[in-house]
Amino acid sequence: MSLEENKAIVRKVTEAENSRDSAVIEELISPTYVNQSNQIKGLEGYKQFLTKLFKAFPSWHETIEDMVAEGDKVCVRLTIDTGAHTGEFDLLGIRVPPTGKRSTVKSIQIWRIFDGKVMEQEGVYDELDLLRKVGLIIPTEQGKKLFPEEV
């Protein structure tokens, strides 16, 4: 597949996540999908992960800021607006009760595409900032000076 076709697949999956379109997810995620970052295996694991995520953050929305492709890989820089945290979610093995707070998180992800399907995805996002913004980490007075809240 061409680089542009691979990038189009990533855009389509991101749009499907944002619109909660499970048919597109099933079409474009490989049954053997692997995501090491979130410890997800297979299409069913991916769908279960999204179900839990959207239950905790019903307004979760990802915006692609940049995209670069080479070979079978697509690298994406995202801004994620979590929306209000209204349901319990599991973060790093800890069950987090709803806080009602929202967060904007930056993420970098690398997707591997093969034969028109997403085979692998790995990424990083600022987990510490997410925890702080939803109120699970309270900074010290010195921390508040170093990292003031956004306006």
Image (cartoon, grey):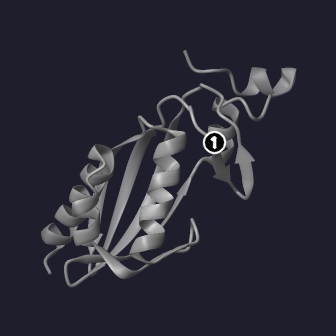
Q: Is residue 149 above or below residue 13?
A: above
Would residue 26 be found to the left or right of residue 82 on screen?
left
Q: Is residue 31 above or below residue 11?
A: below
Q: What residue type is labelled 1?
A: Glu
Name the residue located 45 percent from the left edge and 56 percent from the top edge.
50
Name the residue located 46 percent from the left edge and 45 percent from the top edge.
54
Q: Where residue 14 sits: x, y (%)?
A: 30, 54
Q: Where residue 79 sits: x, y (%)?
A: 41, 42
Q: Tell which residue pokes out farthest to the top in this image.
A: 151
Dot 1, how many residues are within 10 Å of its Cα: few (below 14), some (14-19), or many (20+)? some
Q: Quadrant of residue 72?
A: bottom left
Residue position for label 1? 88
Q: Is mark 1 on a helix, strand or loop?
A: loop
The one nearer the camera, 24 or 8, is 24
The one nearer the camera, 87 or 35, is 87
Would residue 149 be found to the left or right of residue 43 on screen?
right
Q: Is residue 77 visible?
A: yes
Instruction: Quadrant for the N terminus, please.
Output: bottom left
Q: In this view, does 20 lie above or below 86?
A: below
Name the residue located 57 percent from the left edge and 20 percent from the top edge.
150
Q: Where residue 7 sits: x, y (%)?
A: 21, 64
Q: Where residue 77 sits: x, y (%)?
A: 39, 52
Would residue 122 be found to the left or right of residue 29 on screen?
right
The one nearer the camera, 116 or 32, is 32
